[in-house]
Image (cartoon, rainbow, N blue to C red):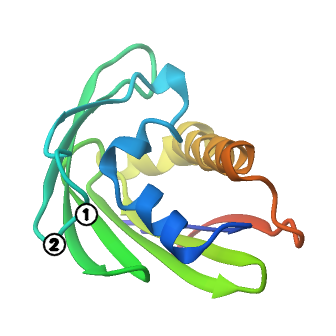
Amino acid sequence: MKMYQLYAEQALPISMEEAWDFLSNPTNLKTITPDYMGFDIVAGAESNMFEGQIIQYIVTPIANIKTKWVTEITHIKDQSYFVDEQRFGPYKLWHHKHFLEPIEGGILMKDIVDYKLPAGVIGQMVHPYLVKPKLKEIFEYRADKLNSIYGTHSDRRTVLKLKSF
């Protein structure tokens, strides 16, 4: 079974506190998700993130097919990182690490998503045509949205890489 990884980084001209306040609030995920995804939080976003928190979403990633997605926040270090893992949803495995680090004039946000697709060989066959481009589009949208909210950092650093193992 093939494993895939998405790596993204983005520099933002904001303080660590401002970045953490935004990113550790689950309701803000809707703000940085494309509207066509029909992203709605069903339960679990009543407070800022904490270890063990279960958050339930409904998303409509393709062909208006509503999909339930349940994640657990498994690790948190205040103003440094958090990890969300899919407990139920469209992927066989989804492990998303979010890191924040201070840089001159702002913060560097890094995401590492390790994921596996369901359906064996069929999942592997659709990955380059459906999943990979969709994830690329979602993370590019997120980067653009964060730049529109907070401005662009002077080094304009935005990186997005997808690879398989």
Whole-percent x, y for residue 124 in the image:
46, 51
Q: Which mark is residue 51?
A: 2
Q: Is residue 49 left or right of residue 25?
A: left
Mark nearest the camera among 2 and 1 is 2
Q: Residues within 10 Å of mark 1 (few under 14, many from 20)?
A: many
Whole-percent x, y for residue 111 in the image:
52, 69
Q: Residues within 10 Å of mark 2 (few under 14, many from 20)?
A: some
Quadrant location of residue 94? bottom left
| Res 122 visible | no
- State the residue lying farthest toward the top: 64
Residue type at mark 1?
A: Glu
Viewer-nearest residue: 20 or 10: 20
Q: Is residue 139 left or right of residue 156?
A: left
**Could you say whether the residue bearing mark 1 is in a helix, strand or loop?**
strand
Residue at the spot 81% in from the left edge and 66% down from the top edge: 153
**Could you say whether the residue bearing mark 2 is in a helix, strand or loop?**
loop
Q: Is residue 42 above or below residue 127?
A: above
Quadrant location of residue 72? bottom left
Q: Is residue 121 above or below residue 56?
A: below
Whether the residues at callouts 2 and 1 have beta carbons within 8 Å, the answer is: no
Q: Earlier in the sequence, mark 2 or mark 1?
A: 2
Q: Is residue 46 above or below residue 50?
A: above
Distance between mark 2 and mark 1 Cα atoms: 11 Å
Residue at the spot 59% in from the left edge and 71% down from the top edge: 109
Q: Which mark is residue 10?
A: none
| Res 8 visible | yes
Whole-percent x, y for residue 20 in the image:
45, 68
Q: Which mark is residue 85?
A: 1
Residue type at mark 2?
A: Glu
Viewer-nearest residue: 61 or 110: 110
Residue at the spot 78% in from the left edge and 78% down from the top edge: 105
